[in-house]
């Protein structure tokens, strides 16, 4: 604006009039800038306030929706259990790409397998199943389901059936800490994965079973059977032995009531020992569980079955 825009009495000469007009224009421009800055700051404040309130409301709606959803869910049973796939069949020891490869004369080559089996079976030690308030004997042969009442009628913890390691015979790890690996006769431990309140059904007829199982079928048992997966491996697998109650999964261990009601639950196990695998060759074995409501899927190779590759070097 310069030093000309000052108060005082001066003559209205053309120069003064010109300077006054210039001064007035500069004052208007300054006022416009000040107004624009104030208006911009006010607008930004309004925009920020709007988005803060908007996101608070959005978060409130999200939290409210989650809370409403949680009110419809049970702590004890999946709400949409009718959409749950049949149980998977899994084995111990687990390995990358379901391959067990070792040299029977080299303990270091199979120690990771035997260590994982020892760790898994530790929960089945007899001294961990002595509490009479938590465990009970459910028989030494397959029986019907053990009904412990409706799932949500009683929220106190329920007893579970004992499962003793001795049922697994030579694959129990009690007498043979190497589980047959040192002789080229490896064991694996197989279980049906847990599904809350699922009741596996025994096969409805013997015709649905492989021929070797038909003569051994039992009414309260989910049998399991292994054989060569590839035609070229036929005759190279040798004898397969099964250990466990009835050589399958007995029904008295079902249904499972979940971790809250049965935190000490022990799944029934089947031990499978391959006693005469051909050495120095890759062999693929497929194992399946058979039941009326146990199905298989090409998309999930562990649904009701699994396959495993053995490579045993002498």
Image (cartoon, helix red, strand yellow):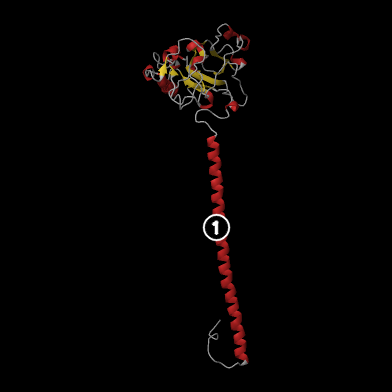
Left or right: where does residue 291 sit relative to residue 123?
right
What residue does disc 1 label? 49
Q: Residue 282: name its quadrant.
A: top right
Measuring from the top left, give residue 124's x and y in whole percent. 41, 19
The residue most toward the front is 153
312 or 66, which lies in front? 66
**Residue at the location (58% across, 67% down)?**
39
Measuring from the top left, give residue 80's x and y in whole percent: 58, 29
Which residue is drawn at the image coordinates 59% and 8% (left, top)?
A: 214
The residue carrying pointer 1 sits among few (fewer than 14), some (14 to 19) or many (20 or more) residues within 10 Å by Cα, namely few
Q: Nearer the viewer, residue 5 or 65?
A: 65
* Foreground pick, 66 / 129: 66
Residue plotted at (55% across, 57% down): 49
Q: Nearer the viewer, residue 157 or 34?
A: 157
Instruction: Answer yes or no: is residue 246 visible.
Output: yes
Task: Classify residue 210 by image quadrant.
Answer: top right
Residue 11 picture location, percent across and down: 58, 93
The answer to which image quadrant residue 166 occupies is top left
- Against 3, is 76 above or below? above
């Amino acid at each position: 604006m310069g030093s000309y825009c000052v108060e005082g009495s001066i003559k209205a000469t053309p120069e003064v009039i010109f300077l006054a007009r210039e001064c007035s224009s500069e004052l208007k421009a300054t006022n416009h800038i000040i107004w624009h800055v104030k208006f911009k700051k006010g607008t930004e404040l309004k925009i920020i306030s709007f988005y803060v309130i908007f996101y608070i409301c959005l978060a409130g709606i999200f939290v409210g929706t989650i809370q409403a959803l949680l009110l419809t869910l049970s702590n004890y049973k999946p709400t949409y259990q009718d959409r749950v796939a049949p149980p998977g069949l899994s084995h111990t020891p687990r390995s990358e790409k379901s391959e067990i490869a070792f040299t029977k004369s080299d303990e270091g080559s199979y120690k990771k397998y035997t260590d994982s089996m020892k760790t898994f079976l530790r929960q089945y030690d007899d001294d961990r199943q002595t509490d009479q308030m938590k465990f009970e004997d459910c028989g030494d042969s397959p029986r019907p389901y053990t009904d412990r009442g409706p799932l949500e009628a009683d929220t106190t913890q329920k007893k579970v059936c004992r499962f003793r390691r001795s049922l697994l015979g030579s694959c129990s790890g009690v007498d043979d800490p190497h589980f047959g690996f040192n002789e080229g006769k490896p064991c694996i431990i197989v279980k049906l994965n847990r599904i809350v309140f699922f009741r596996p059904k025994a096969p409805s007829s013997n015709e649905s079973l492989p021929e070797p199982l038909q003569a051994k079928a039992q009414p309260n048992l989910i049998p399991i059977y292994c054989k060569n997966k590839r035609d070229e491996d036929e005759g190279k697998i040798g004898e397969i032995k099964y250990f466990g109650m009835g050589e399958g999964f007995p029904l008295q261990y079902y249904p499972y009531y979940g971790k809250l009601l049965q935190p000490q639950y022990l799944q029934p196990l089947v031990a499978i020992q391959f006693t005469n695998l051909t050495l120095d060759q890759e062999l693929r074995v497929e194992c399946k569980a058979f039941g009326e409501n146990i199905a298989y899927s090409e998309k999930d190779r562990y649904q009701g079955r699994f396959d495993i590759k053995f490579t045993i070097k002498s």
